[in-house]
Amino acid sequence: MTHDEFCALAKEYGFERVFFLAPERFELAENPHHLVTDVCAEFPFASSIAALVFPYAPFPDGERIPPYYLASNAAYHGMKALIKRLNELGIRAENADIPIRPALLRANIGAVLRTGFLSIAPFGTRIVLMSIAVSELGPLGYELTEKTFCSGCRRCIDACPAGAISESGVDYAVCHRSQMETAAHPDAIRDCQSTYIGCEVCQRCCTMNAALEKAEPSSEVLAAFDTERLIRGDASAARALVGKNMTSNGKLTAEAIAFAARDGLFSELIAEQAASPFEAVRDAVRYAKKLSRDDGA
């Protein structure tokens, strides 16, 4: 198999670009996600690491369903299917959880924005990155074609609801996206959350994404994220679309309650969830009652 044939095969699973990187060692100051840093030792068979780029279309402004998490789940399953197909063709391939962003930057690919996101033309930051160790196909060289374009732009700084972005980068301790990784949210986040699961404000306003064509959520996605359905605790369809990692312990129901409470909807249905087995849901009911009292004051 040639590099071009590999790319054509990967495209069948939604990966529009593939970069072939050298298996190398990385030094990380912190490694909370337990990424593989000694790539050669972990994958001694690998001739290269194939970095797979899965681009996705942003949804229109105001849409509360997050396209990233839908794409992330689709990319993960696409990667698994691609690995299976490669193995069937006699090419050894394994999922490689390496520090993909540093690996791409080391190979002169993409540019890091002050939001912390990696931008790869022509997809901007609307990408999901996956990486697999592969035999037979060696690394390729890439010339630097992109640079950081943040020096004269303050859109994300001005738009960030948490004030987490500055000229020097992101303070992840206050970033809403990082604080929304668990099911329970403080009221300050519920007051201004704009999407389920995580915040996307900085990506929506980023000039690197301005030219991307927006797409409407499919009828399947809209049905899965129906507010009333989620408040009733029926989140199985939505979880199937975005994955279980970020949606456990009643997270989607709790967030639906917060959205509905802000919209002044489904008050009786929300009250029925006061006996939920999930603490995050019960706390969201408390939040809804708080808003109701405040509105009545």
Image (tube, helix red, strand yellow):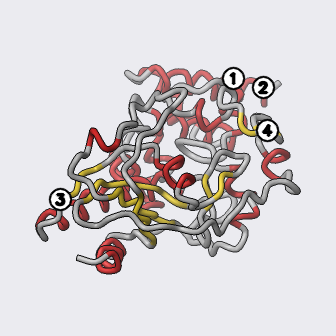
The mark closer to the camera, 4 or 2, is: 4
Amino acid type for the residue under numbered disc 1: Lys
Q: Residue at x 41, y 40 (%)?
A: 25
Dot 4 lies on which element?
A: loop
Closer to the N terminus: mark 1 or mark 3?
3
Real-space Cα separation, disc 4 to disc 2, in angstroms:
38 Å
Q: Residue at x 58, y 68 (%)?
A: 143
Closer to the N terminus: mark 2 or mark 3?
3
Residues at marks 4 and 2 touching, judged by CB atoms closer than 8 Å: no
Closer to the N terminus: mark 4 or mark 2?
4
Residues at marks 2 and 3 touching, judged by CB atoms closer than 8 Å: no
Please give the residue where the numbered disc 2 appears in the rendered image. Answer: 294
Residues at marks 4 and 3 touching, judged by CB atoms closer than 8 Å: no
Closer to the N terminus: mark 1 or mark 4?
4
Please give the residue where the numbered disc 3 appears in the rendered image. Answer: 92
Residues at marks 1 and 2 touching, judged by CB atoms closer than 8 Å: yes
Which image quadrant: the C terminus?
top right
Closer to the N terminus: mark 4 or mark 3?
3
Real-space Cα separation, disc 1 to disc 4, in angstroms:
37 Å
Real-space Cα separation, disc 4 to disc 3, in angstroms:
42 Å
Residues at marks 1 and 4 touching, judged by CB atoms closer than 8 Å: no
Is 211 above or below relative to 78?
A: below
Please give the residue where the numbered disc 1 appears in the rendered image. Answer: 290
Amino acid type for the residue under numbered disc 3: Arg
Q: Residue at x 28, y 58 (%)?
A: 47
Please give the residue where the numbered disc 4 appears in the rendered image. Answer: 168
Amino acid type for the residue under numbered disc 2: Asp
Q: Which mark is residue 24?
A: none
Real-space Cα separation, disc 2 to disc 3, in angstroms:
61 Å
The mark closer to the camera, 4 or 3, is: 3
Amino acid type for the residue under numbered disc 4: Ser
Dot 1 lies on which element?
A: helix
